[in-house]
Image (tube, rainbow, N blue to C red):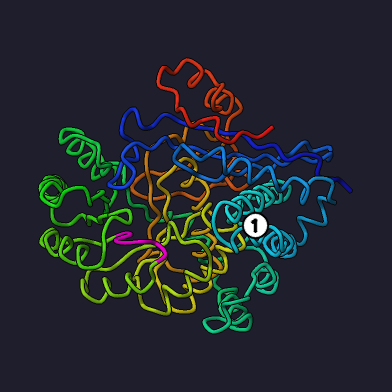
């Protein structure tokens, strides 16, 4: 038997705002950041579970504090018992009445729980010697159903429904896994599309995306409609008629504004419109979806929990569901969302525009491809070419596809040197910065 002996959390920030990487209509100067957690045990194997919550800079210290507040729920527990009952661990954290009051089941504390849950999954997969996607895909349907909390979901999916979906896939798992390993998982790239890039960089990155085998790119929009029309025209001329171009407004518009803006971009053959309005406004998404059809609405990266996912599906408010690896309460809740999507026939194309999100979310999509929906042709995972070099097992994306990771774990462990260099505010990158954020010490963790 081993015990969990530590939960360490660090504020890690990358100065991506200096090159306008990640810039969009709502977030003009993001610094890609991670409230990074490491869970240790006294086991002889020395393995550590690692995960994070993605943020874009200021406020990362608040997320760090929320994760640190969970130490008492984790440290000192029997590691084997926790890892053997990840459904029970999820419920113990999410249903803690005092923590729950801070949400319930949304916001900073819910994401903090997700980081701890994901770190435990990383540790479990490392102990099993498997990549997380394969560990999940090898679990029995009953084990998978037991991971999910169906409270608030049973009007859309019941445990029996979920069990039936998973059982139907069991005879197909081996062939699906061979297919995944042979052809990879489709990707699309947002690398050309950041709003702060000049025309020369937009053109160069669009050409590179086509040369690298991507069949879809995404551009940020929502700052100025005439400028969006101009940039879309440049991109369409560069990539040609056969490459799909999605657009992402990052919550910029009200309903009528969204419809009018999208109508002006319609001639460019828009693949989907992402986050056209507030992520919490299910009815506004539904109205926009109705009025801009057949252009699909995509949303979900800021989706607070599985309940919002259910409502978006029930209201036919989107056609493309974009799960995020660190927005909800970890692997367990994302499994619930994948089950909802599979039950109702909704496409899932994850959000991965941020540090480490590509590394993390690929495991969820690959599990889905093997053990749940089996879909590949109408799915794609977002890819951005930023910061992968800081991870122990960076993604393998080539020929426009993600290739299944083989290293044990969830892909969320960062290199020790990167953690030290980009630690905020005392790492070398920040300690010598002449433009230090005056709000950086608003909340610090002892």
Q: Position of residue 172 (x, y in %)?
A: 54, 72
Name the dominant secondary structure of the magenta segment: loop
Determine the secondary structure under disc 1. Answer: helix
Q: Position of residue 303 (x, y in %)?
A: 46, 61
Q: Position of residue 441 (x, y in %)?
A: 55, 30
Residues in magenta, as a range: 274-280
State the residue in front, 161 or 66: 66
State the residue in front, 404 or 22: 22
State the residue in front, 211 or 280: 280
Residue displayed at 78% across by 56% down: 82
- Which quarter of the picture shows residue 279? bottom left
- Which quarter of the picture shows residue 442? top right
Residue displayed at 21% across by 34% down: 201
Q: Quadrant of the C terminus?
A: top right
Q: Is residue 112 left or right of residue 351?
A: right
Q: Position of residue 219 (x, y in %)?
A: 25, 49
Q: Is residue 144 above or below residue 27?
A: below
Q: Is residue 238 above or below residue 430?
A: below
Asked if residue 43 is among those painted magenta in the image, a careful observer would answer: no
Q: Is residue 200 above or below residue 52?
A: above
State the residue in front, 242 or 162: 162
Q: Is residue 236 left or right of residue 24?
A: left
- Which quarter of the picture shows residue 105? bottom right
Residue displayed at 59% across by 75% down: 166
Q: Is residue 6 above or below residue 99?
A: above
Q: Residues within 10 Å of mark 1 (few under 14, many from 20)?
A: many
Q: Is residue 292 left or right of residue 382?
A: left
Q: Is residue 164 left or right of residue 39?
A: left
The residue that mark 1 highlights is: 135
């Amino acid at each position: 038997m081993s015990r969990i002996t530590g939960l360490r959390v660090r504020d890690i920030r990358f100065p991506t705002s200096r090159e306008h990487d990640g810039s969009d209509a709502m977030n003009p100067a993001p610094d890609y950041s991670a409230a990074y957690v490491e869970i240790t045990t006294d086991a002889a194997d020395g393995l550590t579970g690692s995960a994070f919550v993605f943020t874009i800079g200021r406020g990362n210290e608040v997320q760090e504090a929320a994760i640190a507040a969970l130490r008492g729920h984790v440290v000192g527990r029997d590691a084997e018992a926790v890892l053997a009952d990840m459904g029970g661990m999820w419920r113990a954290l999410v249903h803690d009445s005092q923590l729950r009051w801070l949400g319930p089941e949304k916001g900073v504390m819910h994401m903090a729980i997700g980081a701890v849950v994901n770190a435990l999954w990383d540790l479990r997969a490392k102990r099993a010697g498997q990549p997380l996607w394969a560990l999940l895909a090898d679990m029995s349907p009953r084990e998978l159903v037991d991971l999910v909390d169906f409270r608030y979901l049973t009007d859309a999916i019941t445990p029996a429904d979920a069990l039936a979906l998973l059982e139907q896939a069991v005879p197909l798992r081996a062939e699906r896994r061979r297919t995944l390993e042979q052809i990879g998982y489709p990707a699309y790239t947002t690398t050309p599309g950041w709003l702060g890039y000049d025309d020369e960089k937009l053109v160069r990155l669009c050409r590179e995306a086509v040369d690298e085998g991507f069949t879809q790119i995404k551009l940020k929009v929502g700052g100025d409609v005439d400028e969006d029309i101009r940039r879309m025209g440049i991109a369409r001329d560069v990539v040609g008629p056969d490459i799909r171009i999605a657009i992402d407004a990052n919550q910029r518009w009200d309903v009528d504004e969204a419809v009018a803006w999208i109508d002006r971009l319609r001639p460019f053959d828009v693949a989907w419109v992402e986050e056209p309005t507030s992520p919490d406004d299910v009815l506004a998404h539904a109205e926009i979806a109705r009025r801009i059809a057949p252009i699909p609405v995509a949303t979900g990266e800021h989706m607070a929990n599985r309940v919002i996912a259910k409502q978006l599906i029930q209201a036919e408010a989107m056609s493309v569901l974009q799960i995020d690896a660190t927005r909800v309460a970890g692997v367990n809740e994302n499994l619930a969302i994948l089950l909802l999507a599979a039950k109702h026939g909704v496409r899932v194309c994850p959000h991965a525009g941020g540090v480490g999100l590509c590394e993390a979310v690929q495991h969820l999509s690959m599990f889905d491809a093997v053990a749940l929906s089996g879909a590949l042709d109408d799915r794609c995972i977002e890819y951005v070419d930023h910061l992968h070099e800081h991870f122990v097992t960076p993604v393998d994306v080539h020929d426009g596809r993600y290739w299944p990771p083989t290293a044990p774990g969830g892909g969320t462990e960062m290199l020790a040197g990167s953690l030290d260099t980009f630690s905020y505010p005392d790492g070398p990158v920040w300690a010598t910065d002449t433009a230090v954020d005056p709000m950086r010490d608003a909340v610090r963790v002892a």
